Amino acid sequence: MTSPGPRTDYEQIAPDYDRDRQEYDSFDDELAALLAGALNAAEAAGAPRLLADVGCGTGTLLSRFEQDSCDAYQWKTVGFDPSRKMLSVAKGKVFSGALAAAAAERLPLRDGSAGCVLSTFAFHHFHDFAAFLAQARRVLAPGGRLLLRNILPREGPEPLMYRFFPGAREIDSRRFPLRAPLLESLVAGGFVLEQSICTERLYRFTAERYLELCRKRTISQLHLLIDENFRRGMAAIESYGREHSGEMLEERIPVHTFVAARA
Ligand SMILES: C[S@@+](CC[C@H](N)C(=O)[O-])C[C@H]1O[C@@H](n2cnc3c(N)ncnc32)[C@H](O)[C@@H]1O
């Protein structure tokens, strides 16, 4: 799976990214529990206690891991992201872990030096998913764990965004895989799938809040839409707000999390 076409410019998005993610939490109790299991399993297999977050963005996961459980696990952490501006926001939140500018396709870690590679809501941005898997396998020691979390909008209910911005559907169809080929690529990449969990999240927005969320275009689909289609979608939300005053917009998003062991 490679992702051709225009790319989201996170240098531009970085200043507003966290503010616009208040509703969309990357790190929740489910992820904390899966991560704990992955770290314990990797440790039991004798893998080094280094956790690498690939496409770490503004450091949401690493900072939460640091606050909640880093002491308990005594793992070192490192976050990689190609966007220096996303990393500079992360620097204000991640205090004990390292952060470095690097892409998923070329991780600056020695062979077998990590016990866990984590990546959340990021792989649809990678230029080459197979190259990322090859890198994850290379840097993980035997028995190390790969933990991936993302939406798969081509499966299940359509994102609310498609209703107002139909061009976003086409953008996503180029970037997101279907679940079955994703799992096949994990196996082909030298991983054994251990857990595959899908949890539906329900979001409710007033039209005003949804407009506010979309306005800065920090959601990558909106960033990639041509301006005219973006303006048309914003006008459609405004008109919805006028015609359905007081009604909430609802969105169901299945979030997929996969844990795989390095074979
Ligand atoms: C939607 S953000 C997710 C950030 C974070 N993981 C989270 O859950 O909040 C996607 C991130 O992927 C990063 N990214 C884009 N291309 C990448 C690549 N080739 N390798 C690694 N990260 C990449 C972007 O810079 C951005 O910070």
Image (tube, rainbow, N blue to C red):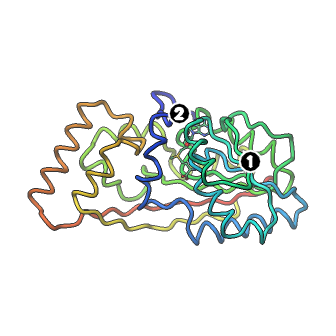
What residue sits right under mark 1 in the picture? 98
Q: Is residue 50 left or right of residue 160?
A: right
Measuring 35% from the left and 40% from the top, which residue is drawn there? 222
Residue 109 horizontal/vertical position (percent) = 81, 40
Instruction: Please give the name of the residue rendered at 50% of the width and 37% of the height, measured from the top-left corner.
Output: 10
* Horizontal side of residue 159 vs 17, given as left or right: left
Q: For residue 3, which numbered disc appears in the image? A: 2
Q: Nearer the viewer, mark 2 or mark 1?
A: 1
Residue 233 higher or lower than 198, as above or below: above
Towards the viewer: 64 or 50: 64
What quarter of the picture does the N terminus occupy? top right
Percent from the top left, x then y, of residue 108?
A: 77, 36
Callout 2 environment at 10 Å: few (<14), some (14 to 19), or many (20+)? some
Q: Secondary structure at mark 1?
A: strand
Where in the figure is residue 113, as x and y percent of width and height?
86, 47
- Residue shown at the point (87%, 56%) measured from the top left: 48
Above or below — where is 171 with respect to 39?
above
Classed neighbour count for the residue bearing mark 1: other residues with Cα under 10 Å, few (<14), some (14–19), many (≥20): some
Spatial CA span between label 2 and label 1: 28 Å
Q: Earlier in the sequence, mark 2 or mark 1?
A: 2
Say how many tags the image has. 2
Figure quarter occupied by ligand 1: top right
Label 2: which secondary element: loop
Residue 147's place in the image compared with 204, above or below, is above
Amino acid at circle 2: Ser
Rendered view: 127 above or below 163: above
Front in this rendered view, residue 161 or 130: 161
* Residue lying at the far left of the rendered structure: 243
Name the amino acid, label 1: Ala
